[in-house]
Amino acid sequence: MTQGLFGLPIAMASRWIFNSYAVRAPDATVAVVDPGLPSVADAVLGAIRSQLAQDPRDVRAVLCTHGHSDHVGGVSTLLRSCDAEVHLPERCSAYLAGEQPR
């Protein structure tokens, strides 16, 4: 496994399985990739505490690979616990203004 890259626990919601990842930088800041749905993002926050032994406030970036709700739906949940920059594909930037993901 690449040092600093963590596959967070797979979360199941209904019949769907969601994968999220955390990347810990050498300065101990964290980036979350694809936080999933809001319920999955709650599990991500718990895993940051338990698996990485870090405070969610250490999350400085949230990266979403594309705009489906199972990748971006949990962004607002994460932002309630941290002050992270959100990085979305350009065509999904309207989500930051409140547009609902499909």
Image (cartoon, rainbow, N blue to C red):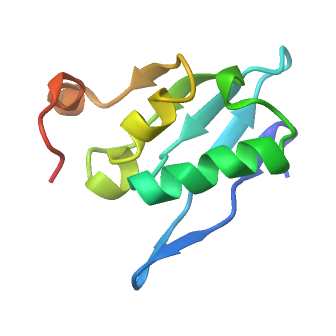
Residue 61 in the figure: left or right of residue 96: right
Residue drawn at (63%, 44%), measured in percent from left and top?
A: 45
Q: Is residue 95 above or below residue 12?
A: above
From the top left corner, tell me how far across and down residue 99 is, in percent.
12, 35
Q: Is residue 40 above or below residue 13?
A: above
Residue drawn at (61%, 50%), measured in percent from left and top?
A: 44
Residue 28 in the figure: left or right of residue 81: right
From the top left corner, tell me how far across and down residue 29 is, in percent.
74, 20
Q: Is residue 29 above or below residue 72?
A: above
Q: Residue furthest front?
A: 80
Residue drawn at (83%, 42%), measured in percent from left and top?
A: 52
From the top left corner, tell me how far across and down residue 28 is, in percent.
83, 21
Query: Where, by quadrant of the figure, is residue 31 drawn?
Result: top right
From the top left corner, tell me how far across and down residue 55 is, in percent.
76, 30
In the depicted view, which residue is nearer to us: 92 or 99? 99
Residue drawn at (40%, 85%), measured in percent from left and top?
A: 15
Residue 5 in the figure: left or right of residue 89: right
Residue 87 in the figure: left or right of residue 10: left
